[in-house]
Image: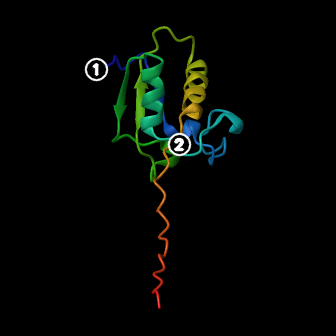
Amino acid sequence: MLRKNKYFVLYPEYFNKSLSRKQGRKIPRNRAVENCTLSKIAYACKHLELDYEVEKDKKYSKNWWNSEGRIIVNPEGIANKTDLIRRIANISRKLKKVEKPQDQKKTKTSTKTKK
């Protein structure tokens, strides 16, 4: 459990490309992520070797009806929250999209009868 008096809180809305700044996005749109999820942020925190904790039951106040949770990050070794958000956004953008396997097209096989 992280100390509650000194930590950074990150919500997926900070990185969501479809939201405006007024709706909670914290980074420029060209650095934002299409569909940012808690798992992408957690992967970025793990990649940066940060001490973090996922809280799925928490809500972002500007998007309380559709929020999926938050991540609490220990600020040791990080200059400020803005630096942390930028570093996580860079890693989240580089994650490859998981592609769904495409349905194989059914090809009709013609059977010719010999006369």
Whether residue 8 is visible? no
Q: Nearer the viewer, residue 88 or 94?
A: 94
Callout 2 amino acid = Lys
The quarter of the picture where residue 58 lies is top left
Q: Residues within 10 Å of mark 2 (few under 14, many from 20)?
A: few
The quarter of the picture where residue 42 lies is top left
- Locate residue 97, reporting x and y percent: 53, 42
The quarter of the picture where residue 73 lies is top left
Quadrant of the image for the N terminus?
Answer: top left
Q: Quick check: 18 left or right of 58? A: right
Q: Using the numbered discs, state the Cα–Cα distance from disc 2 to disc 1 in whole angstroms.
A: 31 Å
Q: Which residue appears at 59% of the width and 39% of the height?
A: 33
Which numbered marker is on residue 44? none
Q: Which label's residue is closer to the chain start, 2 or 1?
A: 1
Which residue, given by chain and number where applicable, does mark 1 sit on?
A: 1
Question: 42 above or below 66?
Answer: above
- Locate residue 85, reporting x and y percent: 57, 25
Helix, strand or loop for disc 2? loop
Q: Quick check: 17 left or right of 43? A: right
Disc 2 to disc 1: CB gap under 8 Å: no
Helix, strand or loop for disc 1? loop
Q: Of circles 2 and 1, which is in front? A: 2
